């Protein structure tokens, strides 16, 4: 009896679902804002969803035709609204992590944004040599400036550093053995794992040494006529501390010369200027590695360098020539957007004293606590009418993206405890705001780390937070 009852309710519910035609007519009257072809598809999949819900016995609201019609139309409207808004959107970064891979790493400098717009709205000479009028080479667009800044003989840009490593290994060491220290078999961001990249590059990885100690002798023992190159990898996102030893670039360079194979270095984070001038620990710059004997080096353009996503390969002409001939390059090359943004970013490096003013990453690395305190005070004053407790607390920032992993940058956070909603709700409402705001929760308190928020974002942040409490 009970089962039969349930079945009949279900049938009634199913019969109450309006037809596609009915819904379509009503939607069109409401001016849905998208073409009928897509409207039909969305209506159909929503009708199907309700059918499934009912058949699974999970629809237990009132079952009138009107109520179902209204529910479906509301849901379709919500879907269309979502479709029309951008999925990729601006975020105010309150995480304190300067190069957050999930937040798009480096925000671009104003000259990069400006140059991007100029190049994108118009045609450009991506592959035309304006001097001769003949076919040009996109790879030459930034080569000279990179060589000047790094002291390299030759340079090449590809999609990202993972692509750069892949291309270098495949071009120079294909079907050959490549020794690499067990202490340097890094995984970065889950998808870049050195052993896998080496496999994809069709080289045979020869692990040498141990996790904490690798000696020159360990490399020397495996070198032979089958060796295609020696790989060294910057242990970007971790450090092996304590009883450790790794082999210096100079020593490895000696070995590589002896066996006439290239010493390849995956530098990772792309430091081009001495960071000590900004109060950071010493980190060798690209130029120094080349001087020490690295033949070919790769790094990301969107880490400490502060540019768009790209991978930069620098080194000696003879090796770069080989790399540029690899057919894989076609699949890994960058588009005009990347070149426009990268070229403008690199030009800032021609006058390094301007980096702190012009490069957002450099700004965030160097903004003083005094200044952050000023911004914090401004926020507290602007938000003081709202139902929340606030204070400013000293904390730390990180570079992120595996760059300078031991560097804890002193920072300041606005700490918020809302009294009219939960901390989780506040975090979610801020994530769903326009622009989205990303902070973090610790001990039931919401933190906005000010180092990664720009001065000109403070008033916007105030607006966003006020709006949440005005609902
Ligand atoms: C970040 C990093 C990579 C990956 O670079 P992407 O630009 O993200 O592809 C590879 N190697 C090292 C050492 C890195 O630090």
Image: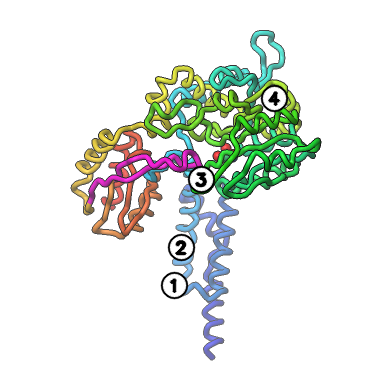
Disc 1 versus disc 3: distance between alpha carbons?
57 Å
Residue 239 numbered mark, or none: 3
Based on the displayed image, in which of its 4 quarters is residue 109 positioned?
Answer: top left
Q: Is residue 418 left or right of residue 454?
A: left
Disc 1 versus disc 4: distance between alpha carbons?
68 Å
Q: In the image, what residue occupies the spot 52% across and 34% down?
A: 302
Disc 2 versus disc 3: distance between alpha carbons?
55 Å
Q: Are marks 1 and 2 in contact (CB under 8 Å)?
A: yes
Q: Is residue 56 left or right of residue 412?
A: right
Residue 61 numbered mark, or none: 1
Residue 320 numbered mark, or none: 4
Whether residue 379 is visible to the viewer of this picture, yes or no, is yes
The residue segment tinted magenta is 390-413
Q: In the image, what residue occupies the spot 52% across and 47% down?
A: 240
| Mark sitting earlier along the chain (2/4) | 2
Secondary structure at numbered mark 4: helix
Q: Position of residue 31 (x, y in %)?
A: 48, 47
- Is 321 a magenta residue? no
Callout 2 environment at 10 Å: few (<14), some (14 to 19), or many (20+)?
Answer: some
Whether residue 123 is visible to the viewer of this picture, yes or no, is no
Per the image, the residue denoted by label 2 is 71
Q: Are marks 1 and 3 in contact (CB under 8 Å)?
A: no
| Mark sitting earlier along the chain (1/4) | 1
Q: Is residue 417 left or right of residue 405?
A: left
| Mark sitting earlier along the chain (1/3) | 1
Based on the displayed image, in which of its 4 quarters is residue 274 positioned?
Answer: top left
Residue 375 numbered mark, or none: none
In this rendering, the label closer to the viewer, 1 or 3: 3
């Amino acid at each position: 009896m009970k089962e039969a009852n349930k079945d009949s309710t279900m049938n009634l519910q199913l019969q109450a679902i309006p037809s596609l035609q009915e819904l379509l007519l009503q939607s069109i009257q409401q001016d849905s804002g998208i073409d009928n072809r897509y409207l039909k598809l969305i209506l159909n999949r929503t009708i199907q969803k309700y059918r499934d819900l009912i058949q699974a016995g999970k629809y237990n609201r009132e079952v009138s035709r009107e109520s179902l019609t209204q529910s479906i139309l509301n849901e379709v409207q919500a879907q269309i609204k979502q479709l029309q808004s951008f999925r990729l959107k601006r975020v105010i970064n309150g995480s304190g992590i300067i190069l957050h891979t999930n937040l798009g790493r480096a925000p671009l400098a104003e000259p990069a944004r400006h140059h991007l717009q100029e190049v994108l709205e118009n045609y450009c000479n991506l592959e035309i040599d304006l001097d001769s009028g003949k076919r040009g080479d996109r790879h030459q667009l930034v080569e000279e400036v990179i060589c000047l800044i790094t002291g390299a003989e030759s340079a090449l840009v590809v999609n990202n550093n993972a692509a750069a490593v892949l291309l270098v290994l495949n071009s120079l060491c294909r079907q050959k053995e490549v020794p690499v220290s067990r202490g340097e078999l890094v995984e970065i961001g889950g998808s870049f794992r050195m052993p896998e990249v080496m496999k994809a590059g069709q080289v045979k990885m020869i692990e040498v040494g141990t996790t904490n100690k690798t000696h020159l002798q360990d490399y020397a023992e495996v070198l032979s006529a089958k060796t295609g190159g020696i790989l060294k990898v910057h242990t970007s996102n971790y450090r092996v501390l304590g009883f450790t030893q790794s082999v210096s670039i100079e020593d490895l360079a000696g070995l590589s010369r002896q066996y006439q194979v290239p010493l390849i270095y995956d530098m990772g984070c792309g430091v081009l200027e001495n960071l000590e001038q900004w109060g950071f620990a010493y980190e060798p710059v690209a130029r120094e590695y080349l001087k020490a004997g690295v033949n070919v080096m790769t790094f990301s353009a969107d880490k400490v360098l502060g540019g768009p996503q790209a991978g930069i390969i620098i080194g000696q002409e003879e090796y770069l020539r080989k790399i540029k001939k690899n057919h894989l390059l076609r699949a890994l090359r960058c588009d005009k957007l990347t070149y426009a943004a990268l070229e403008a970013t690199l030009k800032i490096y021609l006058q390094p004293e301007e980096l702190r003013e012009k490069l957002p990453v450099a700004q965030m690395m160097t903004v003083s606590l005094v200044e952050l305190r000023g911004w914090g005070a401004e926020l507290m004053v602007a938000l003081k009418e709202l139902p929340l407790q606030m204070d400013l607390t000293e904390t730390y920032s990180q570079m992120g993206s595996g760059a300078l992993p031991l560097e804890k940058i002193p920072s300041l956070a606005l700490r918020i405890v809302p009294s009219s909603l939960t901390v989780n709700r506040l975090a979610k409402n801020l994530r769903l705001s326009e622009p989205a705001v990303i902070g973090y929760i610790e001990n039931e308190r919401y933190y906005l780390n000010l180092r990664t928020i720009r001065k000109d974002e403070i008033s916007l942040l105030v607006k966003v937070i006020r709006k949440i409490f005005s609902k």
